[in-house]
Amino acid sequence: MTFEQEIAALRQRIARAEHARDRWRASGNQEQYLEACSTVSALDRQLDSLRETQHRDADRLPGHGAGS
């Protein structure tokens, strides 16, 4: 799986988690809502980490690093 595919898949997971979070908020179920908020936050951090890895790997390619 390429970075782009991994990022796209993670964005889909985030969208589903946000939808679930919003449903729990609307239902008034505080416990489930907070759990869903945690899930969204964890997925956001995972996406940030993946993007950082992608940029770091791209910087290692010839012609992309410092001094290019």
Image: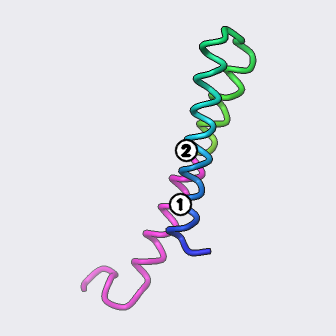
The magenta stretch spans residue 64: yes
- Residue drawn where x is 53% and y is 50% of the image: 11
Figure check: 21 above or below 65: above
Q: How many numbered discs?
A: 2
Point out the stretch of residues depicted in magenta.
45-68
Figure check: 30 above or below 67: above
Figure check: 15 above or below 66: above
Q: Which residue is mark 1?
A: 7
Dot 2: element: helix
Magenta-colored segment: predominant secondary structure = helix
Between 7 and 51, the one nearer to me in the picture: 7
Screen quadrant of the N terminus:
bottom right
User: Which kind of residue does numbered mark 1 sit on?
Assistant: Ile
Crowding around mark 2 (Cα neighbors within 10 Å: few <14, some 14 to 19, many 20+) is some
Crowding around mark 1 (Cα neighbors within 10 Å: few <14, some 14 to 19, many 20+) is some
- Residue drawn where x is 53% and y is 70% of the image: 3
Closer to the observer: label 1 or label 2?
1
Marking on residue 44? 2
User: Which kind of residue does numbered mark 2 sit on?
Assistant: Asp
Between 51 and 7, the one nearer to me in the picture: 7
| Image position of 56 (left or right of 5) | left
| Image position of 47 (left or right of 55) | right
Q: Quadrant of residue 33?
A: top right
Figure check: 55 above or below 41: below
